[in-house]
Image (cartoon, coloured by chain):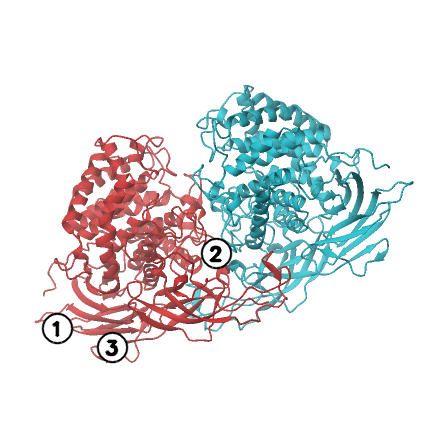
Chain colours: A red, B cyan
Amino acid sequence: MSRTRRIPVPRGPVRPGSEAHSALTPATGAAILGGFWHARRAVNATVSVPQGPGLLESAGNLHDLRLVAGAAEGAFEGDYPFMDSDVYKWLEAAAWQLGQEGPAAPAGPGDTRAADCAALQKDVDRIVALVAAAQQADGYLNTWVQAGKGGGRYADLRWGHELYCAGHLIQAAVAHHRSTGGTELLDVAVRFADHIDATFGPGKPVDGFDGHPEVETALVELYRETGERRYLDLAGYFVDRHGHGVLGGEAYCQDRVPLRAQENVEGHAVRQLYLLAAAADLAAETGDAELRAACERLWSAMVATKTHITGGLGAHHHHEEFGDPYELPTERAYCETCAAVASVHYSWRMALLTGDARYGDLIERTLFNGLLAGVSLDGDRWLYVNPLQVRDGHTDTGGDQSARRTRWFRCACCPPNVMRLLASLEHYVASGSAAGLQLHQYATGRYTVDAGGTALSVSVNTSYPHDGAVTVTVEDADGDANAAARPWTLSLRIPQWCRHYSVTVAGQRLADPVVEEGWLRVERAWAPGDEVVLDLRLDVRCTAADPRADAVRGCVAIERGPLVYCLEQIDQDGGGLDDLVLDLSRPLTAAERPDLLGGVVTVRATGRRVAAPAAAGAGWWPYREADSAAGTDPGETVALTAIPYHAWANRRDGSMRVWIPTAPPAG
Amino acid sequence: MSRTRRIPVPRGPVRPGSEAHSALTPATGAAILGGFWHARRAVNATVSVPQGPGLLESAGNLHDLRLVAGAAEGAFEGDYPFMDSDVYKWLEAAAWQLGQEGPAAPAGPGDTRAADCAALQKDVDRIVALVAAAQQADGYLNTWVQAGKGGGRYADLRWGHELYCAGHLIQAAVAHHRSTGGTELLDVAVRFADHIDATFGPGKPVDGFDGHPEVETALVELYRETGERRYLDLAGYFVDRHGHGVLGGEAYCQDRVPLRAQENVEGHAVRQLYLLAAAADLAAETGDAELRAACERLWSAMVATKTHITGGLGAHHHHEEFGDPYELPTERAYCETCAAVASVHYSWRMALLTGDARYGDLIERTLFNGLLAGVSLDGDRWLYVNPLQVRDGHTDTGGDQSARRTRWFRCACCPPNVMRLLASLEHYVASGSAAGLQLHQYATGRYTVDAGGTALSVSVNTSYPHDGAVTVTVEDADGDANAAARPWTLSLRIPQWCRHYSVTVAGQRLADPVVEEGWLRVERAWAPGDEVVLDLRLDVRCTAADPRADAVRGCVAIERGPLVYCLEQIDQDGGGLDDLVLDLSRPLTAAERPDLLGGVVTVRATGRRVAAPAAAGAGWWPYREADSAAGTDPGETVALTAIPYHAWANRRDGSMRVWIPTAPPAG
């Protein structure tokens, strides 16, 4: 191989543009080929994504596009002004799916290529044509407004979601073009983007922004895909138009304060995160140091004070919003599945921008917990909110925000969001820089990066997170049979949760591996076939929260590796969960259970069933004098089995809790 | 005095009708003449109530009535379909106010009669005339629908609030008639009630009910006031029409299950409580044993599992609804002020129906805590929701559900609800039965009851709840200078919180007072001037919650007598509240502070400021391994001052908490 050969451009999300100021660049080639994520992606590819068109038909999304295209009659069926975006997000998922690398022939039942590509391509073509037909002559496209449901174009920026839908259209078009080379949807997106650019801005017909960010990051990606600088400038205009009261000054719409001056994340979680992703994109493309500092500051504040242990974000059902610092409720945790997707988008952009490993920590935690809980193991039932507790005797009132899985939602933003993330997941694993190759996540597959003009490839083999051993084999090492190998650095993220690890390079255990800011860096003149084995010890951990996190005082969460565990009622010895305490003096042990939930590692622990303290008047009133006899009965010992949180709610309904009290009531 | 003289009928809410099956009857005469409640009622009478018309003008409520009456032009101004009810609730408050007993001349600055009755009467007359003018010829009245804002009469029973508004109109009319003898508003109410009776029912134009209960209990009261049985029957029809899916089967509308089969309170808290109050009314009037059993069962379940320590009800901001059993959040406690009013209405009806003292326990707790916190000390700023915690650094997003007091709300249901309860509070103090007189609450004043055809009067003097001594003096004792006195029983409620009390009768301390089901009963042949002194010991108590109340695990609340206390940031030694723990090994002492907040008894305690445990990675992520060093630093000792919860949020904004951790983070 020669150093002068052409290195392919990245085919996934967040491709750098022409003025990138990022520390790292995305992998130019990436394929997940086995292990944990491969199995989950196979379900996404063979169940979730193929079911999309039928569900979009049932919910009326496609009918409404046909209606405004003049290809159908009848009443408008959509319930919300943003339902076009469900179609676009599904198209984006399908587009990434169609562009996946890997063997063209099915490699086995778990292979995502086993999905029927021809059928998927047909669905995509048909829906792309429908979207194109629905577009108006001047580029505008929004079924809600075109059907006369809104008050006219851009009449309701706060709630109309027109640019939000445009953003998802653009994202889908970028994915479709980048992944398959097709231009049909990109043409639609460019026409709409040009219409928006002609409409929005100082001195243009509308000087404002959409209440739900999304078009901003889409426009940056469109700039990257087309090279058209106007789109980048328009994205910058939209980001900086926030926070000046144009939409009433509400935090909900990210309009209370400019991002550049903001001190902590606030308002509607998904809106906040999409806006931050766009700001990170802009900082990467323009080198805007102030914007970058805001992105770093807000990420740190969010992680330190407003992130659930699952990576979930959003504390209030009301307004789907962030709460105060350390306000991290359990049963009323909102943790919208879309917020987990948005968090990964934001963090990945920050990882590329800064080169820091800590962003990969949050991505890993979010992927394995807060995000993955959003979809059932069989890929066809969903959670919109992801609580950390469901009580014994919980009365579920149904609706989108139910703690029980649903086939599809009235507001179906989350399912296609999960689909598009899983379908593009291979692009969040590795990156390159002039120094070498970085592995942010551990997923069996093959990853190629551009290291300052040189292609480097590695393959990864691991059964992570069930097991902590990760084997990285150098495949293409800047080597040339005729030239001396140039040294480069393989960087492996050491997760923040990991206290004990070892690393072996070409059979030699490194005595004193250097870890800098989360990266274990191994520099050498690599040769193809060189093998690095990273062994992350997966001890079972009991984790406590900051004392200001009132909701979980006196409780611990069980964790192992990147997985957060929970107790589900069905796994215990009968009875409920709400009278259990965890006995920390007894060992907690991991147990492989290939038979359970598609194969999980459970954690076995010992607990006790503690009766509520008896007190005068007990029963009629749930409060008692603190000095009355309490906590003296140690309670009946019971064996507890915890499962990974991401696998909960896949059996019969019951109670669940992540945070478990450690002591009987006292005081 | 003679036994045969005519005893006046009760002039307050919940007057029994002709077929009452209640254990107790309301006092026939009641006046609060001094002490704690007198002062609060003076503010209500001189500030809150007189400000009503101006606020109803500013918010558009009166304009909209004029609009449909043809007496004004312009656009409809109301934001919600239920805004007429604000007017009616204010009218009800004003009517009770006008009918208050007591000295006609102002007795001092704290006397509620110091209010300008003439001005109030003028406002009432003017607004009653406006309401009458807005009524349509067939009796229908609703500005929202008449102005064409809804989809027509009764087109949206789930959200239209037409019968809810009718109910408040009827309640106001009953109060106006019962309190002042005026018939102008009663005529309007009767016309509307007849219209509703002609419209709703099996075989009538509409077979359904209003999504927000209120008309039900209003119709029972209208029956009591007019003797017209149709109104009682219509109320019974409405109550039993719930729970059969007519409005979609949602718990929110009390339509998931019939009340008679319901196991715990659910759905929108105020809707649930108004419906239960009506059911209790019906049971009292008809003797319906099944309905009575449901009312008792649901009250017990509510109190045992869904009531905050303040008496506050409602756990979710979303849908203003009850949560699961033991789901009792602190900062996101909803505890709508209206729910406190509704809870008093429900519990008082249960107290009269059953004769049980425990209903008075909840009323007392609610009045002194959850309800009274809803209005500022100066009577002109309000809380719609009553959280039990506000964090350090809380970001308030404004709006009706803010944790900061507001001059008036967009949805202003709560302020006039508090006004009408405070203006009629004297009627919730005492009752009569054939056996004698019962005191449910302790408020300085004079109370007369009908004891099986005999009038009995007592006066009460107390500085409760600051002090626990209550002096009851017999004023009119069924005595006749010429006849032997007939014995009767004075029943005094011993609060559930009270462990130590004594009682002195005519100077003699009772050695072994008998308390049965919460009542201390003293039977004797009383003579005018006989004095009973009840001394309730007001120890400072630290109260813990049921271990299933996860939100307050490891915390205690400070209480003294019926008052729940809280820490407010302003009273501590600088710094915030969220790093404090309470040291239970140090004494908690009460301290009179006449200078503070209009005169309160504070509680002094000792706490410690505990730093968040240091741990690897601390700061970036709020979770740490549970076995890392923690809880070893006892922290800096600080003096703490707690104030009554009802007096919070009357100084500068800051953090607040009712539940205080008792130990540093451990484990």
- The subunit letter for the residue under badge 3 reads A
> In the image, which is nearer the foreground, mark 1 or mark 2?
2
Please name whichever residue, A89 or A331, is drawn nearer the observer in this view of the structure. Answer: A331
Q: Give the position of the N terminus of chain A as an image quadrant.
A: bottom left
- Amino acid under label 2? Glu
Q: What's the residue at 71%, 29% (across, down)?
A: B180
x and y percentages locating residue A167 in the rendered image: 28, 43
- Amino acid under label 1? Ala
x and y percentages locating residue A404 in the rendered image: 38, 52
Q: Is residue B600 visible?
A: yes
| Disc marking residue A484 | 1
Residues at circles 1 and 2 in contact by the CB criterion of under 8 Å: no
**Mark 3 and mark 2, same subunit?**
yes
| Disc marking residue A225 | none
| Disc marking residue A504 | 3
Q: Give the position of the C terminus of chain A as an image quadrant.
A: bottom right
Count neighbours of disc 1 (C-alpha within 10 A) and say few if under 14, some if 14 to 19, many if 20 or more.
Answer: few
Report how far apart the C-alphas of labels 3 and 2 lie in the structure: 42 Å
User: Which residue, given by chain and number where applicable, does mark 2 sit on?
Assistant: A327
Q: Is residue A219 visible?
A: no
